[in-house]
Image (cartoon, rainbow, N blue to C red):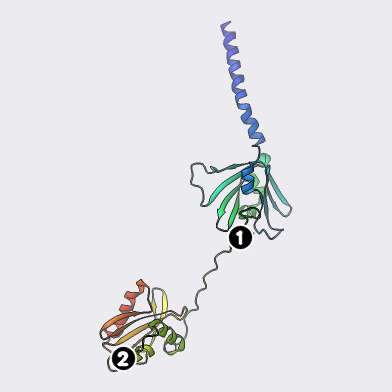
Amino acid sequence: MKTSKNHGALLAAALFSAAAFLPVAAWSQQGGKGLAPDAMAAYGGRWSTACADASAPTLQVREDQLIVESGKRRVVGRAPESAHSFFGNSQPPARFDVALMSNVGKAGALTFLVFREAGGQSITLDAARPVAGQLGPELMKLRYWRCDGSARAATPPAEPAATKQPSPPTGSPAALAQGPAMQKAWRAALGAKENDRWLVRREGPAPEPQWVTVDGTRYVLHAFCKPHDCFDNNAIALYDQGSGRIYGLAQRNGKNTLVGAPPQALAPQLDKLWREQWRQKN
């Protein structure tokens, strides 16, 4: 009798334990109940790689479905849920907002990762390997932008334009040194109040202008001085033909002054070039 009672107790415990797992198993197969109204208000609607182009790859966030469409290709995830802790204890990507998770039958999970960008909300795709195979690598790599709702982003923000590199310096240093472009830049660097003729016009005794490279930039170096008083009144000018910038160092009555507000890192180079022109050679 004790054996029978023990067997009955063990059977009852086993049945209870199995019953305890039934709701979880049923929920896992059926998924959640769909997106809550607040999630639909925040993320529901159409998303696209180019909202103004009806033929562009598109996502749809519905209460009961997450849909990816491109041409004749259509993948549907059902019973979506939202999860702000999708990455667990790992640090989420920058600007991550929420994960919208769904299930594409036996193929596995399809997830929309929502980000808050400067130009509006955007989505990237995350999926189980079979689902990713249905979508293809191109659709998986794209970023989709919100096309309706309060955070609408009609078009993706423009990529920063590549900085146009100046043309490489060309021409004779002597011709450039005497040309109107360098003279205009030098006059502007000195300021309108400067009226010392030899300094303004750079027309006194001078070594031959030359190309020099300073911190990766090629300049025309023009050294010149006041007639009959070169040792205490002289100057150098560095002209960047590509950008039109000009920097210099002028000595008057033995006192040195920087010209053209050169960057701090350039000041020692100007001093070095000035010494080479007006101290080591004189």
Q: Secondary structure at mark 1?
A: loop
Image point (61%, 30%), residue name:
24
Q: How many marks?
A: 2
Q: Quadrant of residue 232?
A: bottom left
**Residue 53 in the image: x percent, y percent?**
69, 60
Amino acid type, label 2: Lys
Residue 260's place in the image compared with 21, above or below, is below
Q: Which is more N-terminal, label 1 or label 2?
A: 1
* Residue count near mark 1 (Cα–Cα under 10 Å), binned few <14, some 14–19, many ≥20: some
Spot the residue most to the right: 72
Residue 261's place in the image compared with 61, above or below, is below
Are discs 2 and 1 less than 8 Å apart at CB?
no
Does residue 77 appear to the left or right of 215 in the view shown? right
Q: Quadrant of residue 3?
A: top right
- The answer for how far apart the CA atoms under marks 2 and 1 are is 59 Å
Q: Secondary structure at mark 2?
A: loop
Amino acid type, label 1: Pro
Q: Quadrant of residue 226?
A: bottom left
Please give the residue where the numbered disc 2 appears in the rendered image: 226
**Residue 148 in the image: x percent, y percent?**
66, 54
Which quadrant is home to the N terminus? top right
**Residue 116 in the image: x percent, y percent?**
56, 53
Which quadrant is home to the C terminus? bottom left
Name the one closer to the observer, 143 or 97: 97
**Residue 14 in the image: x percent, y percent?**
59, 19
Please give the residue where the numbered disc 1 appears in the rendered image: 156
